[in-house]
Amino acid sequence: MALALTEGELKQLVDGFTAYVEQQRNHYFPSAVPLDLQQKGPLEPFFSPTLFDRVRMVELQHERLPGPPQSVRDILSRHMEVPEIAHMASFTMVDVVVFQETVTHRRLFHALVHAAQFALLGTRPYLELYIRAFARAGRYLAVSLEVQAFSMDAQFAEFPSNIFSVEDEIRLWAERGLYRQH
């Protein structure tokens, strides 16, 4: 179900989400910590050392992430029910992952796929692809960036010995234009 958003509204959403992601990333970065050896262990074959060097994480204990700016919620609420970031297990903001639920290897894998997508596609292009796909589909589970992350985390969970390069898969999807097709 495509949302009837104007090009101006799409631009406002991209601008608003970009500012929100950057603000939240900057807020949580000082308290974020590098991944430890136990967290990295089973994931290392799938990601580059460079990504592990960059990514930091925070485990929230008695708080939840705030939602996006009111201007973003206003645009979305005219077209649909706004998804609640506070209900997500984790949220990746470029190189900072904020966990709102227990960290598992599978959840961490999924979050790291998004961190790799941010790194390889760029923050604004990632967010623009995400928001435009969301507007076309009307639900986040149909967004190509999510489809890829869920597909990879499922493959990791089911066949952890079947090693593949997450970054190579992201590059392949980008080269083939697969992010724009969903």
Image: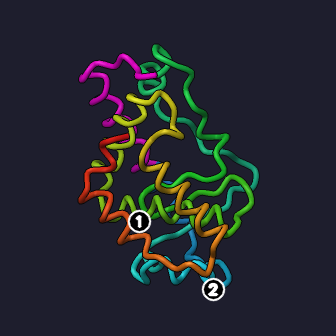
Q: Residue 79 or 139: which is nearer the viewer?
A: 139
Residue 174 among those drawn in magenta: no
Residue 51 pos. (x, y %): 42, 75
Helix, strand or loop at label 2? It is: helix
Give the main secondary structure, helix, strand or loop, of the magenta stretch: helix
Which quadrant of the structure image shows residue 71? top left
Residue 41 pos. (x, y %): 62, 84
Residue 137 pos. (x, y %): 44, 30
User: Is 17 on the left-hand or right-hand side of 86?
Assistant: left
Q: Residue at x 70, y 64 (%)?
A: 103
Q: Is residue 12 above or below residue 94?
A: above
Tell me which label, 2 or 1, sits earlier in the chain.
2
Q: Residue at x 70, y 66 (%)?
A: 104
- For the residue carrying disc 2, how many other residues have a C-alpha within 10 Å: few (<14), some (14-19), or many (20+)? few
Which quadrant of the structure image shows residue 98? bottom right
Residue 13 among those drawn in magenta: yes
Alpha-carbon distance for marks 2 and 1? 19 Å
Look at the image and give the residue range highlighted in magenta.
1-23
Name the disc covering residue 37, or none: 2
Q: Residue at x 65, y 65 (%)?
A: 106
Query: Most extreme residue toward the top, as rendered?
Result: 78
Q: Is residue 45 above or below residue 78?
A: below
The total of numbered circles placed on residues is 2
In the picture of the structure, the residue carrying the numbered disc 1 is: 116
Q: Residue 175 or 79: which is nearer the viewer?
A: 175
What residue type is disc 2 on? Answer: Leu
Helix, strand or loop at label 1? It is: helix
User: Is 52 on the left-hand or right-hand side of 110?
Assistant: left
What residue type is disc 1 on? Answer: Ala
Q: Residue 112 or 75: which is nearer the viewer?
A: 112
Mark 2 vs mark 1: in front: 1
Q: Residue at x 46, y 58 (%)?
A: 114
